[in-house]
Image: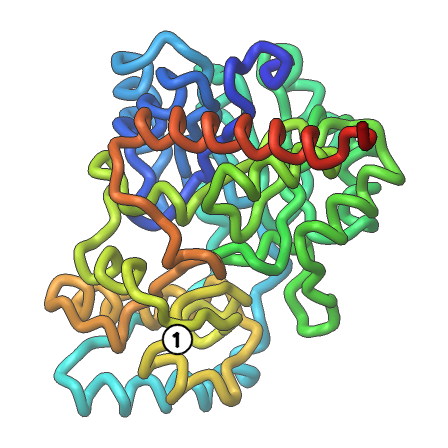
Amino acid sequence: MVLDDLPTPIVLAPLGGGPSTPELAAAVSEAGGLGFLAAAYLSAGEAARRIGATRELTSGPFGVNVFAPVPGPADPESYAGYVDRLAAWARGRGLDVGEPRFTDDGYGEKVALLLADPVAVVSFTFSCPDAALVERLHAVGSEVWVTVTTADEAAVAVAAGADALVAQGAEAGGHRGSFADDGGATAIGLLPLLQILASRTELPLVASGGVATGGAIAALLCAGARAVQLGTAFMLCPEAGTAEVHRAALRSDGPTALTRAFTGRTARGIRNGFMDEHDAGAPFAYPEIHYVTAPARAAARAAGDASAVNLWAGEAHELARELPAGELVRALADDARAAIARAAADLSPPG
C-alpha cells in the first residue's frame, strides 16, 4: 500500500479550483509525502496534461482526486429567486453572472483517463464509486481512497472495497465531502470523527481538516490516523496556484464559516462581503450555483477584490507558512517528531 512506503505520512489535499499544480504535487512527493492533483473543474485533456507534467517532475507516487457526480439536477424553482438576487448584485458592481447548469464535471471521461493512464491513488469526493469501478481501478494498479465525513459514509466506502478513508472534519477548508448536502448532516470535528471511524473499521485513515502544524499532525497520528492530509497549509507555497487576493486573505486572522452562497454546496471559507450578503437563503443547488457565480468570482479575483471571491480556507489558515513545499513537508515532519517525543517524555512513568 502507498501509505506503507511513504517516508513521511503527509498527504497534500487536492486543492481544486486553482491552487493545485503539478509543481506543488511533485514537490510534496519528492519530499517524501504524497502529492495530489485535483481533476475538479478540468477537462479530461487538461487533467491528462497535468498528470504528465507531474510525472516529469517526480518519480514518486502521487494521486488524482475526482469529484464524483452529485444527485440532481436541483429543481429550478428552488434557486430561481437566488439567481435573480445574484444577477442584480452583479449588475450593481459591473460584473457578469453565468447560467445555472447541471453537469457531472466530465466524470466518465476522467475515470476513463485514469483507467488508461493509471496513477498510484485515485480519490473520490462527494460520493463513493461502485464496487465494479473500484475493482477496475485496482486492476490497473491504482488504490482507491474515498472522502468521508460520517461513519455511515465510511461504511459505504468499506463495502465498495475502498483501500483508505480520508476522514474530513468540519474544520476543513473548501467543499464538504459529504455524500449528501441537504442541510440534514451534522458537521463532525476531525478528532471525534477519527476516533469513531477507528472504532468501526480497520481501513487506513487519512485525517483531514484544519491541520497546519507538526503538533497537530502528531496528535492525529497518535489518535489513529495513518497519515494526515493538509491543504490550506500548502496554499502559500510558491508552487501553489493560489491567487494573490486569496494569499493575502490566508495571511490574515479572519474567521471562517460554512457557506453555500458561492456554489450551492456547503464549503468553508474566510468570511467576506459576499458571504455576509448572500448566505441567507442560499439554496442547495450544486453545481448550478457554481456556474452562476463563476464569472463574477473570476473577475473579482483578477481585480484583487477579496469581497467577492470564494476564499476557501481551513480554520487554522493563519498558521500557514510561506515556504517551498518540500521544505514545508520536512519542517512539519520534524515538528511532528519533536511533538511525539515530548508527549512520550511527558507520559513516562515517574522516577
Q: Which residue is mark 1?
A: 271
Between residues 56 and 325, which one lies in front from this camera angle? Answer: 325
Mark 1: secondary structure: loop
Q: Can residue 174 be seen by looking at this rendering?
A: no
Position of 337 compared to 196: left or right?
left
CA neighbours of label 1 inside 10 A, class few (<14), some (14 to 19), many (20+): many
Q: Can residue 153 be seen by looking at this rendering?
A: yes
Name which residue lies at 56% across and 37% down: 217
- Check the image and report above or below for 56 versus 74: above
Name which residue lies at 52% across and 79% down: 76
- The answer to which quarter of the image holds residue 93 is bottom left
- The answer to which quarter of the image holds residue 176 is bottom right
Question: Picture coordinates of residue 343 (x, y %)?
Answer: 66, 35
Question: Picture coordinates of residue 253 (x, y %)?
Answer: 36, 67
Q: In the rendered view of the protein, which quadrant contains the N terminus?
A: top right
Q: How many marks?
A: 1
Question: Picture coordinates of residue 245 (x, y %)?
Answer: 20, 62
Between residues 34 and 96, which one lies in front from this camera angle? Answer: 34
Name which residue lies at 20% across and 38% down: 238
Position of 91 compared to 98: left or right?
left
Q: Amino acid at mark 1?
A: Arg
Name which residue lies at 57% across and 73% down: 284
- Check the image and report above or below for 252 versus 145: below
Position of 337 compared to 12: left or right?
right
